[in-house]
Amino acid sequence: MEIASIGAGIPGRGNPPVLQDRIEQAFLEEMLKYVRPPSSQEGFGGGHGEEQFSSFMNREYAALLAARLDLGLGALE
C-alpha cells in the first residue's frame, strides 16, 4: 500500500479521478458503510437526518481515502 502526498489527487482540485480511484472509492464506500457505528437516537446523535445522509458522508470519506491510498485494485484488471 502506497500513500501519496497530502495534496495530490484530492477530488475538486483539478485532478480528474481515474478509473482505478473510482473502483477503490466504491470498494471503500462499501467498507465504510459496515464499519461506521449506527446512529443513536439519544444524546448527541444525529437521529433520522444522520441515517438519511450518512451515505453522502461515506462517499466523501471514500473519495478522499481513494485519492490518497493505493490499494492496488487497478492491478486486478
Image (cartoon, rainbow, N blue to C red):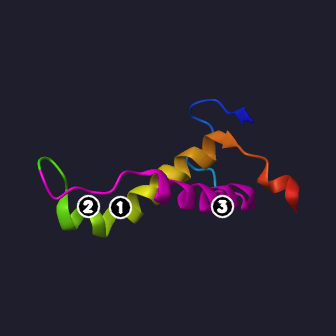
Disc 2, SS: helix
Tag 1: amino acid: Ser
Of labels 1 and 3, earlier in sequence is: 3
Quarter of the image that includes the C terminus: bottom right
State the separation of the CA atoms marked 1 and 2: 6 Å
The label on residue 22 is 3
The secondary structure making up most of the magenta span is helix
Tag 3: amino acid: Arg
Residue at the image point whose x is 81% and y is 55% from the top: 74
Reply above or below: 77 against 11. below
Q: Nearer the viewer, residue 36 or 75?
A: 36
Residue 5 falls left or right of residue 37: right
Q: Which residue is mark 1?
A: 54
State the separation of the CA atoms marked 1 and 3: 19 Å
Magenta segment includes 25: yes
Of labels 2 and 3, earlier in sequence is: 3
Residue 38, position as x, y percentages in the image: 33, 56
* Residues packed near mark 2 inside 10 Å, few (<14), some (14 to 19) or many (20 plus): some
* Residues packed near mark 3 inside 10 Å, few (<14), some (14 to 19) or many (20 plus): some
Of labels 1 and 3, the one closer to you: 1
Residue at the image point whose x is 62% and y is 40% from the top: 68
Q: Which residue is mark 2?
A: 50
Q: Are marks 1 and 2 in contact (CB under 8 Å)?
A: yes
Residue at the image point whose x is 78% and y is 54% from the top: 73
Residue 71, position as x, y percentages in the image: 73, 45
Q: Which residues are magenta?
A: 17-42
